[in-house]
Protein backbone atom coordinates (compact mmCIF):
# COMPACT_ATOMS: atom_id res chain seq x y z
CA UNK A 1 0.00 0.00 0.00
CA UNK A 2 2.84 2.32 0.79
CA UNK A 3 4.27 1.76 -2.71
CA UNK A 4 0.97 2.71 -4.33
CA UNK A 5 0.81 5.96 -2.37
CA UNK A 6 4.38 6.81 -3.44
CA UNK A 7 3.50 6.24 -7.11
CA UNK A 8 0.41 8.42 -6.77
CA UNK A 9 2.41 11.22 -5.17
CA UNK A 10 5.03 11.00 -7.95
CA UNK A 11 2.22 11.14 -10.54
CA UNK A 12 0.68 14.21 -8.89
CA UNK A 13 4.02 15.97 -8.60
CA UNK A 14 4.83 15.28 -12.28
CA UNK A 15 1.41 16.60 -13.31
CA UNK A 16 1.86 19.68 -11.13
CA UNK A 17 5.32 20.29 -12.61
CA UNK A 18 3.97 19.97 -16.17
CA UNK A 19 1.08 22.31 -15.39
CA UNK A 20 3.44 24.82 -13.80
CA UNK A 21 5.81 24.70 -16.80
CA UNK A 22 2.98 25.20 -19.29
CA UNK A 23 1.59 28.12 -17.29
CA UNK A 24 5.01 29.77 -17.15
CA UNK A 25 5.54 29.21 -20.88
CA UNK A 26 2.18 30.76 -21.74
CA UNK A 27 3.55 34.20 -20.92
CA UNK A 28 6.50 33.68 -23.25
CA UNK A 29 4.59 32.72 -26.37
CA UNK A 30 5.14 35.20 -29.23
CA UNK A 31 2.18 37.14 -30.50
CA UNK A 32 1.17 36.41 -34.06
CA UNK A 33 1.88 39.22 -36.51
CA UNK A 34 0.70 38.57 -40.06
CA UNK A 35 3.22 39.15 -42.84
CA UNK A 36 2.22 40.07 -46.38
CA UNK A 37 4.27 39.76 -49.55
CA UNK A 38 2.14 42.45 -51.22
CA UNK A 39 0.26 45.50 -50.02
CA UNK A 40 -2.22 47.89 -51.53
CA UNK A 41 -0.43 51.22 -51.98
CA UNK A 42 -2.37 54.47 -52.45
CA UNK A 43 -0.38 57.58 -53.42
CA UNK A 44 -1.81 61.09 -52.89
CA UNK A 45 -0.36 64.24 -54.42
CA UNK A 46 -0.91 67.08 -51.94
CA UNK A 47 1.59 69.43 -53.59
CA UNK A 48 0.85 72.36 -55.93
CA UNK A 49 2.84 70.70 -58.72
CA UNK A 50 3.10 67.35 -60.41
CA UNK A 51 4.30 64.16 -58.74
CA UNK A 52 5.77 61.35 -60.82
CA UNK A 53 5.48 57.99 -59.09
CA UNK A 54 7.78 55.15 -60.17
CA UNK A 55 5.64 52.14 -59.28
CA UNK A 56 4.83 49.62 -62.01
CA UNK A 57 6.05 52.14 -64.57
CA UNK A 58 5.75 55.95 -64.43
CA UNK A 59 2.56 57.63 -63.30
CA UNK A 60 2.08 61.41 -63.23
CA UNK A 61 -0.28 62.77 -60.60
CA UNK A 62 -1.77 66.24 -60.79
CA UNK A 63 -2.35 68.22 -57.56
CA UNK A 64 -4.91 66.52 -55.26
CA UNK A 65 -4.96 63.42 -57.45
CA UNK A 66 -4.69 59.89 -56.03
CA UNK A 67 -3.47 56.67 -57.65
CA UNK A 68 -3.24 53.12 -56.30
CA UNK A 69 -1.60 49.83 -57.11
CA UNK A 70 -0.73 46.54 -55.41
CA UNK A 71 3.01 46.46 -54.73
CA UNK A 72 5.58 44.14 -53.19
CA UNK A 73 6.46 44.77 -49.56
CA UNK A 74 9.98 45.49 -48.29
CA UNK A 75 10.77 47.21 -51.60
CA UNK A 76 11.62 50.90 -51.88
CA UNK A 77 9.52 53.02 -54.25
CA UNK A 78 10.44 56.53 -55.41
CA UNK A 79 8.44 59.60 -56.43
CA UNK A 80 9.70 62.89 -57.88
CA UNK A 81 8.08 66.25 -57.13
CA UNK A 82 8.00 68.95 -59.84
CA UNK A 83 7.05 72.64 -59.59
CA UNK A 84 4.55 72.56 -62.43
CA UNK A 85 4.18 69.88 -65.06
CA UNK A 86 6.11 66.62 -64.76
CA UNK A 87 8.96 67.69 -66.99
CA UNK A 88 12.42 69.06 -66.53
CA UNK A 89 14.31 68.65 -63.29
CA UNK A 90 12.38 67.60 -60.14
CA UNK A 91 12.69 69.84 -57.08
CA UNK A 92 13.01 66.78 -54.82
CA UNK A 93 12.57 63.03 -54.65
CA UNK A 94 10.95 61.02 -51.86
CA UNK A 95 10.85 57.31 -51.15
CA UNK A 96 8.67 54.83 -49.30
CA UNK A 97 9.24 51.21 -48.26
CA UNK A 98 6.00 49.42 -47.27
CA UNK A 99 6.72 46.80 -44.59
CA UNK A 100 5.46 43.24 -44.71
CA UNK A 101 3.22 43.87 -41.70
CA UNK A 102 1.12 46.39 -43.66
CA UNK A 103 -1.92 45.19 -45.59
CA UNK A 104 -2.40 48.67 -47.05
CA UNK A 105 -0.26 51.80 -47.18
CA UNK A 106 -1.18 55.43 -47.83
CA UNK A 107 1.64 57.60 -49.17
CA UNK A 108 0.78 61.29 -49.01
CA UNK A 109 3.30 63.50 -50.75
CA UNK A 110 3.23 67.13 -49.58
Image (spheres, rainbow, N blue to C red):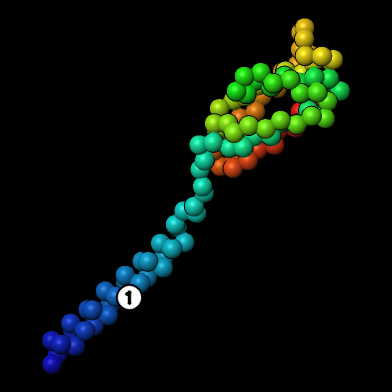
Residue 96, given in percent of the width and then of the height, sits at 65, 28
Q: Dot 1, crowdedness within 10 Å: few (<14), some or many (≥20)?
A: few
Q: For this view, does 15 lie left or right of residue 85?
A: left
Residue underneath mark 1 = 16
75 above or below 8? above
Whole-percent x and y of residue 102?
Answer: 59, 41
Pick the front one: 7 or 110: 110
Which quadrant, please, contains the N terminus? Answer: bottom left
**In front here: 94 or 51?**
51
Quadrant for the C terminus, please.
top right
Q: Position of residue 52 (x, y in %)?
A: 72, 19
Residue at the extreme right of the image, as rendered: 48
State the residue at coordinates (23%, 83%). 9
Locate residue 21: give its quadrant. bottom left
- In the image, taking residue 6 as reference, residue 32 lies left or right, namely right
Quarter of the image where one finds residue 109: top right
Q: Residue furthest top?
A: 88
Q: Where, by quadrant of the figure, is residue 13 drawn?
A: bottom left
Amino acid sequence: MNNSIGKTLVGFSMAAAALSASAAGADLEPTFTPHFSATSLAVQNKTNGCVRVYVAGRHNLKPNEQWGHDVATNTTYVASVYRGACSGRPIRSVSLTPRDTQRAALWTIR
